């Protein structure tokens, strides 16, 4: 959330300077995310300089004591405060002096300490954007709701694609069956023509071809609506209830 808030204020964190007040686990996580977002300079202020130095070395940053914080406060674009101090580490007066040296360039202050370590009055300083835990929770909740809406839209897209894919599979399954059924009907018609050929008397090749063509045309016209109905059934039926049609039997 620190990265997202920083981007809202500066558009990009590339080349920015980050000051972390406190050297605990949250400070280390913040440093990692901010550096990945493009921050080029990381300064870590802590009561125990050795702890700050360990994190600073990991991210190529600088470790300082809390007493030396004012100088770097004026240079920081993003300040994240996470300490166990019982009172305010950053006051309104201290922040105003830093902003004067900063020539009133905007700065983003994020207080994730419990209790708060940044005086809420700091938010009254011009060009200071102060956020605390409650602000972060509000933004997180808003992001979660937006992601839930996006997830719902994604589910609809997935369902639509799955239905289309299932329909394609069903058509692939029924295609050979329909082709085989059409071929079998035509074979039956030809077999009947052969069986009844003698009753037609002498025919020329053209006449025989015409009779066969007429017979195939009748078979196709009769079978066409049946085959189309089979295809529509496969297109609209549920995949778990669809059964392939049985092979047609020829009544003797």
Image (cartoon, rainbow, N blue to C red):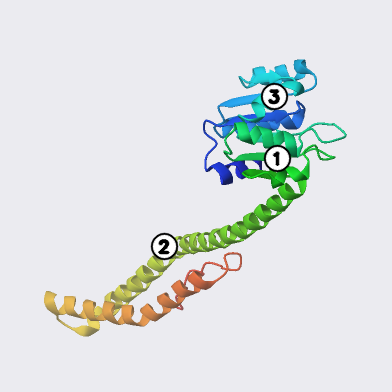
Name the residue at 46% across, 74% down.
Answer: 232
Q: Residues within 10 Å of mark 3 (few under 14, many from 20)?
A: many
Image position of 83 with respect to 170: above or below: above
Q: Which residue is mark 3?
A: 44
Query: Which of disc 2 and disc 1 is earlier in sequence?
Result: 1
Query: Which of disc 3 and disc 2 is earlier in sequence?
Result: 3
In-image side of 144 versus 41 (left or right): right
Q: Residue furthest right?
A: 86
* Residue 176: mark in rendering: 2
* Residue 110: mark in rendering: 1
Question: For this rendering, which residue is in front, 209 or 66?
Answer: 66
Local SS, label 1: strand
Residue 86: image location, x then y, percent: 88, 34
Q: CA distance from mark 1 to mark 3?
A: 14 Å
In-image side of 186 versus 148 (left or right): left
Image position of 28 with respect to 160: above or below: above
Q: CA distance from mark 2 to mark 3?
A: 71 Å
Question: For this rendering, which residue is in front, 121 or 18?
Answer: 121
Q: CA distance from mark 1 to mark 2?
A: 66 Å
Dividing the image into 4 quarters, which one contains the N terminus? top right
Pair 1/2: label in front: 1
In-image side of 43 versus 218 (left or right): right
Local SS, label 2: helix
Q: Quadrant of residue 208?
A: bottom left
């Amino acid at each position: 959330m620190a990265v997202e808030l920083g981007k809202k204020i500066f558009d990009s964190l590339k080349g920015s300077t980050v000051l972390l007040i406190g050297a605990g686990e949250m400070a280390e996580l913040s440093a990692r995310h901010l550096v990945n977002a493009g921050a080029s300079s990381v300064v870590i202020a802590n009561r125990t300089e050795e702890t700050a130095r360990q994190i600073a070395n990991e991210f190529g940053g600088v470790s300082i004591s809390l007493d030396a914080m004012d100088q770097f406060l004026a240079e920081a674009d993003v300040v994240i405060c996470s300490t166990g101090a019982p009172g305010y580490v950053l006051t309104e007066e201290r922040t105003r002096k830093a902003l004067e040296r900063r020539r009133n360039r905007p700065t983003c202050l994020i207080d994730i300490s419990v209790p708060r370590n940044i005086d809420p009055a700091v938010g009254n300083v011009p060009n200071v954007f102060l956020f605390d835990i409650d602000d972060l929770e509000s933004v997180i909740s808003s992001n979660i709701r937006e992601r839930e809406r996006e997830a719902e839209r994604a589910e609809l897209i997935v369902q639509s694609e799955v239905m289309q894919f299932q329909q394609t599979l069903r058509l692939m399954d029924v295609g050979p069956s329909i082709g085989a059924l059409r071929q079998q009907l035509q074979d039956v018609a030809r077999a009947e023509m052969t069986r009844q050929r003698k009753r037609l008397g002498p025919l020329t090749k053209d006449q025989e071809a015409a009779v066969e063509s007429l017979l195939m045309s009748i078979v196709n016209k009769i079978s066409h609506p049946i085959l189309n109905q089979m295809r529509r059934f496969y297109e609209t039926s549920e995949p778990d209830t669809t059964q392939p049609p049985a092979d047609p039997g020829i009544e003797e």
